[in-house]
Image (spheres, rainbow, N blue to C red):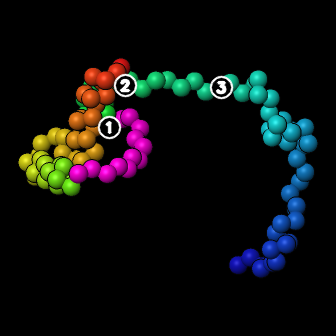
Amino acid sequence: MAERRALIEGLKNSNPAVDPETEKAFVFRDKKEAAPETVQPAAPATSPAAAATLSRVPLSTRMRADFAAALKRASLERQLAGVEPNTLQDILEQAVEPWLRTNGYLK
């Protein structure tokens, strides 16, 4: 087993010195050299499998109690019957997508 030592001893620099120019080049690398990352627009979802590959973000909202109960019941019945979509998330995405397209918020 290694000999125990004080925390301050572990913080002391016992490693060989790094070339200061290499260190500065790493820390303060030139912004011109670093190519900006290009973000590709996501392909529109055409199927549940394609929708599953898109990234998701948490969304919290409130809805009428009767809608929530009906949605939960639909989800459970569809899961038992093996019908897709059967998760709350997938059902809500499938219901909201046509509205967003109709009103011009999705292309």
Residue 5, compared with residue 37, is above or below; it is below
The quarter in which the N terminus is drawn is: bottom right
Circle 1: is it few (<14), some (14-19), or many (20+) Cα within 10 Å?
few
- Residue placed under numbered mark 3 in the picture: 36
Per the model, the C-alpha gap separating discs 1 and 3 is 27 Å
Relative image position of residue 57 (x, y in whole percent):
42, 43
Bounds of the magenta segment? 52-64
Label ID, residue 10: none
Is the residue under label 2 in contact with that under label 1 (CB below 8 Å)? no
**Residue 89 belongs to the span the image colors magenta:** no
Q: Earlier in the sequence, mark 3 or mark 2?
A: 3
Work out whether residue 31 can be spotted: yes
Which of pointers 1 and 2 indicates the residue nearer the eye?
Answer: 2
Q: Element at badge 3?
A: loop
Instruction: Work out whether residue 32 or residue 16 is closer to the camera in this orientation and state it.
Output: 32
Amino acid residing under circle 1:
Ala
Instruction: Work out whether residue 95 or residue 83 is closer to the camera in this orientation and state it.
Output: 95
Q: Main secondary structure of the magenta part?
A: loop
